[in-house]
Image: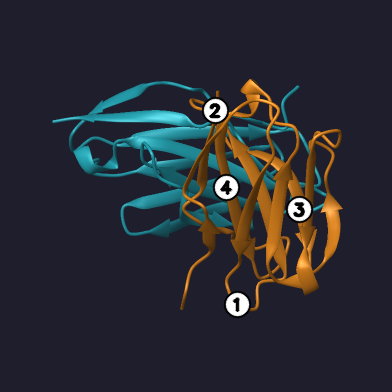
Chain colours: A cyan, B orange
Amino acid sequence: QKEVEQNSGPLSVPEGAIASLNCTYSDRGSQSFFWYRQYSGKSPELIMFIYSNGDKEDGRFTAQLNKASQYVSLLIRDSQPSDSATYLCAVTSGTYKYIFGTGTRLKVLA
Amino acid sequence: EAGVAQSPRYKIIEKRQSVAFWCNPISGHATLYWYQQILGQGPKLLIQFQNNGVVDDSQLPKDRFSAERLKGVDSTLKIQPAKLEDSAVYLCASSLGADLEAFFGQGTRLTVV
């Protein structure tokens, strides 16, 4: 079982819709959870982090964490073509390793 | 505030040659990470330092890869000898602490021919 799992996509949504990206993790001792955006040929860029169960909102982005079910999700409201990128989920394990999933490719169709 | 600096940006070498990458983290960041990212995959953690000590290097191919963090600041990652499958982007990242958000440098794109 992979430590951090994401559906590779592509996930296609129309402009203005809500994009929902999901991530599951295997280590119940995981403490911190991050979402990164990576454009083709660029480095990952931090979008959001979340440490506690529940929702955290920042502009058009909402991160949701459910530690009991071991998943974290990212919602992007009012999706724009400029949001088209690969979204990476990262988790710090119980031993503080900073582990990434394989990423989900998002396409926002104009 | 300056970001994570990496050099070189690009490197092309022949198989069996050696190569070294350099990383200067954000000032004050105790934790430094080296990742390997192969096209179409997520970043794979090679080694994680806390100050100048190693937190994890379980996925570092130690027969050919080595890394050090000088005085808990700059770090170098070396490959010797390189194989074709080492062609990837090597990303350095740093964070204030092991449980906190990490910020990435621009990466070094390595091509082994």
Lower position in the chain sequence, tag 4 or tag 3:
3
Amino acid type of disc 1? Ser
Q: Earlier in the sequence, mark 4 or mark 2?
A: 2
From the image, tell me which residue sits under label 3: B48
Subunit that carries the residue with mark 3: B
Mark found first going from the N terminus, 3 or 1: 1
Tell which circle, 2 or 3, labels the residue nearer the N-terminal end.
2
Residue A62: horizontal and vertical position, in percent? 42, 50
* Local SS, label 4: strand
Of all chains, the one bearing label 4 is B
Q: Which residue is mark 2?
A: B41
Using the numbered discs, state the Cα–Cα distance from disc 4 to disc 3 in whole angstroms: 12 Å
> What residue does disc 1 label?
B27
Circle 4 is placed at which residue position? B91
In the picture as drawn, the residue positioned furthest to the left comes out as A110
Look at label 4 and name its amino acid: Leu
Dot 4 and dot 2 within a common chain: yes
| Amino acid carrying mark 2 in the image | Gln
- How far apart marks 4 and 2 lie (CA) works out to 13 Å
Contact? badges 4 and 3 (CB < 8 Å): no
Residue A3 in sight from this viewpoint: yes
Do marks 2 and 3 both belong to one polypeptide chain? Answer: yes
Q: Are marks 2 and 1 on the same chain?
A: yes
Q: Crowdedness of circle 2 by 10 Å Cα count: few (<14), some, many (20+)? A: some
Mark 3: amino acid: Gln
Point out residue B32 in the picture as x, y percentages from the top left corner. 69, 60
